[in-house]
Image (cartoon, grey):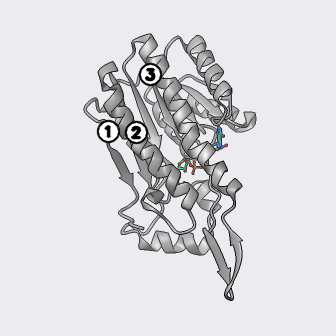
Amino acid sequence: MDLNGKVIVVTGGGQGLGRSMAITLAAKGAKLALIDLSREKLDEAVELCKAAGGDAKAYIANVTKEDDVISTFDQIVEDFGSFNGIINNAGILRDGLLIKVKDGEIVKKLSFTEWQDVIDVNLTGVFLCGREAAERMIKLGIEGVIINISSLSRAGNIGQTNYSAAKAGVAAMAVSWAKELARYGIRSAAIAPGIIATDMAASMKPEALENLTAAAPLKRMGTPEEIGHTCAYIFENDYFTGRIIEMDGGLRL
Ligand code: NAD
């Protein structure tokens, strides 16, 4: 796919990896529809995309709400007249041990809310946005690309029952969609980042962050720009589908 003039939706596009991937695609002439929860962050991201050379518009929507997703995607098609791809990037962390024991006593369990909040955004949000994106691309008869942002944690990680389950799910969904949607000219893939320098990484416990960085052969966090580079590769390489690219500096959990 030549990204010039293509309409790409990025969920969680207001900051971090989403914003950085959007800027990378904007620099290649793409038109970005950025979805996030807050107006301020989105406006900033839109300006950065325009400065990089692409058009961009902001959409406030919650990816966990079916009605919100449907009306936002309709609006995007109305505004841009096309729909060529989506990066399912919006995500949250609610880390905690399944069962926390201190001095032989159970002091905390991973709460149902901590489980459900992560599943709602990181798994259900990807399902809803992926489904609505595919429907519009098929209706428009347009060849397209879906990228799900998974994680190194999809292999299973301590303190991340909820997050690991969701990230394994979105990697599997990318493969299912590659198989189902190839007949309509739609490719689907996932990126599984390791530790990347964003606000999300900054919210981790400092000692956990240090240990993980030290365990990576490259001994550093990845940059959002390096993930943007991978994302552009998936869009541009028409033979790439149904696979997960591990962008983790060689780190294994
Ligand atoms: P971030 O917290 O900096 O940004 C996430 C964005 O998603 C925020 O702007 C937030 O407002 C938005 N968002 C959250 N819930 C939403 C909702 N319900 N609807 C719409 N938008 C919502 O995080 P990041 O580090 O940029 O991470 C982006 C993605 O990459 C996430 O899916 C994350 O799990 C994944 N990831 C990040 C890392 C890392 O080290 N940073 C590693 C592996 C995977």
Q: Residues within 10 Å of mark 1 (few under 14, many from 20)?
A: many
Which is in the foreground here, disc 2 or disc 3?
2
Question: With 110 as the anchor, is 127 left or right in this view?
Answer: left
Q: CA distance from mark 2 to mark 1?
A: 6 Å
Local secondary structure at mark 1? loop
Looking at the image, residue 202 lies above or below residue 62: below
Kindly identify which numbered label has been placed on residue 84: 3
Q: Which residue position holds label 2?
A: 174
Label 2, secondary structure: give it: helix
- Who's the residue at 41% across and 22% down the image? 4
Q: Quadrant of residue 17?
A: top right
Residue for point 46% across, 44% down: 170
**Mark 1 — residue?**
242
Q: Type of residue at label 2?
A: Ala
Q: Are marks 2 and 1 in contact (CB under 8 Å)?
A: yes
Residue placed most toward the observer, 213 or 142:
142
- Residue farthest to the bottom? 103
Q: Which is more toward the observer, 165 or 221?
A: 165
Q: Marks 1 and 3, Cα distance to the nearest angstrom?
A: 17 Å
Check disc 2: other Cα within 10 Å, few if <14, some if 14-19, many if 20+: many
Q: Residue 237: x percent and y percent?
A: 29, 33
Report x, y in % for residue 175: 35, 39
Q: Which three-letter amino acid code belongs to the residue tagged 3? A: Asn
**Mark positioned earlier in the residue sequence (2 or 3):** 3
Amino acid type indicated by mark 1: Gly
Dot 1 or dot 3: first in sequence order is: 3
| Mark 3 crowd level (few <14, some 14–19, many ≥20, 10 Å Cα) | many
